[in-house]
Amino acid sequence: MVDQKELINAVKETVSREDVRYIVGYEEGTYGFETAPSFAYTSDDARKFIFNPLCTKNLVVYPILEEKLPLKREEQEDDRKIGIVVKGCDSRALVQILQEKGLKRENLVLIGIPCTGVVNTKKIKDKFPNQTEYTDVKEEKNHYVFSIEESVQKIPKKELLADVCKECEYPNPVIFDILIGEETEVETEPTYIEVREFEEKSLSEKWEYWKKHFENCIRCYACREACPLCYCKTCMADFLDPQWIRRSVDLSENTAWNIMRAFHLAGRCVSCGECERACPAEIPLMKLNKVLEKEIRELYDYTAGLDPEEKTLFGTFNPDDPEEFIM
Amino acid sequence: MKDFEPKIIGFLCTWCSYAGADLAGTSRIQYPSNIRIIRVMCSGRVNPMFVVNALQQGADGVLIGGCHPGDCHYQHGNYQARRRITMMKKLLEFLGIEPDRVRMTWVSAAEGRKFAQVIEEVTEDIRKLGPMKQVRRKNEW
């Protein structure tokens, strides 16, 4: 569990530094079990900062989403640092962006938080459907503790933990400037059990499953917007010439979009689960990301987002890569 | 019912596979006419979305031809293509689309005979798989 005071003090200290512009973190949301991103420009703003198992969002999207207005005459660009509060997976997404030279390390201050897993907010909402005010959740050993209307409820961690967190290998930030709290012990090796089970099915069964899901896709591109690694200035899905994907929402185009999205994250996805969380049609997008992650690990012994100096998967090659299928 | 004749799109690299196809032609070697060849500068030019778009727009199979490993005119284009196409095939298989619809081959400029054999083999394989059903684009208006 992260000490709230320690976090606030660290943010206060960092944001009062002269070379730091603002810090992105979490604050209490306005509805139910949601947390909201919070921006601290002064040390006073840091009071609002929290961290609990409800902080699911990946804040790494913010330094990239930030709109840069054209400079006025004789105006200097504000090149002060941006601070981000990062969990394990967020820091890996950042490493991946640094690898691809999307951001510069010297422009960032990272406040690392060793994570013990975040909750699946959809599951909580099913359990407490009538909760409209922000409710805090605390973690105690293997339980989540909810205090709702003066009654305290304990729910086992297993029931509410997000699926991606169950097999998390890197709960501790890979890169950080300040670490808050103690590092979490890593227990699990990923087994990819869900993906392996699905792979056993026949081709037609698999297609039936995906067809059902892709027909529901409304192509809102929420998966793209939430993903910290989908930061191309112009997405291929928005191109008109060549038009890789037509605008019409039907099975063929939806499949093409989902293939493209998954493929563009091959060897880059860090399994933060933001795409699946953002999806209003509840398409199991992480399954696609996970199967590619598994294959890449088996074939090329490569894991995304660990070393900022490493080269990207598709930017490198090994002459001895497997090629059984080539005639 | 008429026998099914598959349509196959071939992305052939201009330095090896396309020259190999040319040699097969000038040597008067017979091979099935199911392949429609698109010349690309390198197999590394083949964006995996080319494959998906071809399958959407009427192809039953896609063949990507490149130089033998180590022979690439651009040093390593075929190595990079190999990684991409491997992952694309894995993804298609996971989605329930027959991965054998996407084939890759190394044909050098001297291998006209091999080119004809590859086309025969691919055509037969795809004839067995039948027409592409899953992601075919509907042109209804």
Image (cartoon, coloured by chain):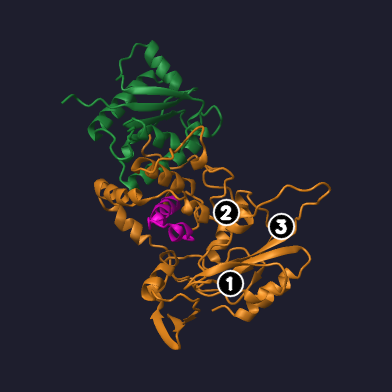
Report the Cα–Cα distance between label 1 and label 2.
26 Å
Instruction: Indicate whether A185 appears above or below A75.
Output: below
Tag 3: amino acid: Glu
**Residue receiving disc 3:** A106
* Residue projecting furthest to the bottom: A150
In contact (CB < 8 Å): disc 1 and disc 2:
no
Of callouts 2 and 3, the N-terminal one: 2
Question: What residue range appears in magenta?
Answer: A272-297
Q: Front-most of B87 and A247?
A: A247
> Dot 1: few (<14), some (14–19), or many (≥20) neighbours within 10 Å?
many
Q: Which chain's colour is orange? A: A
In contact (CB < 8 Å): disc 2 and disc 3:
no
| Residue B110 visible in the shown view | no
Q: Are marks 1 and 3 on the same chain?
A: yes
- Which colour represents chain B? green
* Residue A96: mark: 2
Q: Front-most of A93 and A58?
A: A58
